[in-house]
DNA sequence: CTACAACTTAAAGTCGACTTTAGGTCAAGA
DNA sequence: TCTTGACCTAAAGTCGACTTTAAGTTGTAG
């Protein structure tokens, strides 16, 4: 596969693939002239990278978990991530509830509403937001 | 309250408060010489801003929901956010399960494990990650 | 009254993850 | 053989949310 095919198959831009290569996250199977070509396993690897990104790992973190061939998953790190996700999910659920309430609460002033008050306190804990660009 | 007190009470740095003011998110109650002073309602406002940040709104988005005094919550936007959170929570739960499994899965090669395979597919959907800096 | 810690400003810097640009190479179809 | 579109590189730019810096001002404790 050439870089455009990998891009299509993975949903990443060619520039991103080159960038990942530069960071040591992936490598091409070789070159045809200047042009990179890849074998299919790179798609698996990219899926894995996506997964890591999704759970909030940085590219650097991820590179520490990937071996040239395949993966080296640090189980302790995984358990830690699992716990973090648990907390985060719980907070998000609480916030979801609060928003849901706010969306339907007839009180003219949300600030006065006790449910909203609780919500504010939760957010006050400053478990930091994560940026979504979708 | 002076800026340092607000900073202490809100957990934000003075520089952040000035930045928020510059963006029109908050304003001081006045000046004492050059120095800003605030009344307590700014803390409520900051809590609200925190909340918005937490659910993934940008500062610009947030500024559109805040009036000089108090809040102008767009209920449709809230409902939309609620729905988004639902999706996100569901995905995170699935990933949490996957990670939990991976952390305990005895298979030497995660890539071979069907649970992990499902996980990869999920992440493959590229519901984008959110950056955590904690 | 003086020192100085804490405030002020505007502007530049930072961070991660990319994207864009400028300038060049080259495989393959007409 | 020529053209051209897709590829290449290195370097600079972008984005959001701040933080840092440099240079200046001032309320207040001693």
Image: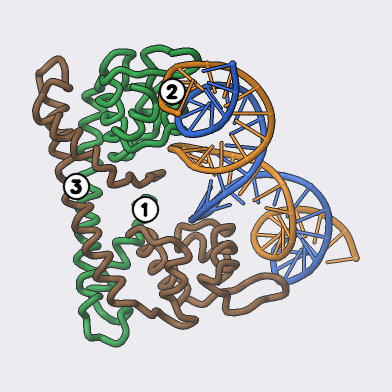
Chain colours: A brown, B green, C blue, D orange
Q: Chain of mark 1?
A: B
Q: Are marks 1 and 3 on the same chain?
A: no
What is the x, y in percent for residue C24?
Answer: 83, 60
Residue B129 disc label:
1
Numbered disc in front, either 1 or 3? 3
Cα distance in 3D space between marks 3 and 2: 28 Å
Instruction: State the residue at coordinates (29%, 40%).
Output: B54
Numbered disc in front, either 3 or 2? 2
Task: Report which quarter residue B3 is drawn in.
Answer: top left
Which quarter of the image is occupied by the C terminus of chain A? Answer: top left
Does D1 sit left or right of D26 as displayed?
right
Cα distance in 3D space between marks 1 and 3: 17 Å
Q: Mark 2 and mark 1 in contact (Cβ < 8 Å)?
A: no
Per the image, label 3 sits on a secondary structure element best described as: helix
Per the image, label 2 sits on a secondary structure element best described as: helix
* Vertical position of residue D2 compared to residue C9: above or below: below
- According to the picture, the residue beneath numbered tag 2 turns out to be B21
- According to the picture, the residue beneath numbered tag 3 turns out to be A91
* Vertical position of residue B33 compared to residue A25: above or below: above
What is the x, y in percent for residue B66?
Answer: 32, 20
Does A61 sit left or right of A110 as displayed?
right
Cα distance in 3D space between marks 1 and 2: 29 Å
Q: Residues within 10 Å of mark 3 (few under 14, many from 20)?
A: some
Front-most of B45 and B54? B45
Q: Mark 3 and mark 1 in contact (Cβ < 8 Å)?
A: no
Q: Residues within 10 Å of mark 1 (few under 14, many from 20)?
A: many
Residue B4 disc label:
none
Q: Chain of mark 3?
A: A
What is the x, y in percent for residue A62?
Answer: 43, 68
Q: Are marks 3 and 2 on the same chain?
A: no
Task: Report which quarter residue D7 is drawn in.
Answer: bottom right
């Amino acid at each position: 596969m050439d870089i455009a095919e990998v891009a299509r198959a993975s949903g990443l831009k060619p520039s991103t693939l080159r960038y990942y290569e530069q960071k040591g996250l992936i490598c091409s199977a070789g070159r045809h002239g200047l042009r990179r070509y890849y074998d299919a396993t790179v798609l698996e690897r990219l899926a894995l990278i996506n997964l890591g990104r999704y759970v909030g790992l940085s590219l650097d973190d991820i590179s520490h978990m990937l071996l040239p061939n395949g993966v080296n998953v640090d189980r302790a790190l995984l358990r830690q991530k699992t716990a973090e996700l648990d907390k985060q999910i719980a907070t998000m659920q609480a916030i979801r509830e609060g928003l849901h309430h706010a969306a339907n609460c007839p009180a003219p002033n949300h600030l006065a509403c006790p449910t909203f008050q609780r919500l504010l306190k939760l957010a006050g804990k400053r478990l930091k937001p994560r940026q979504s660009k979708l």
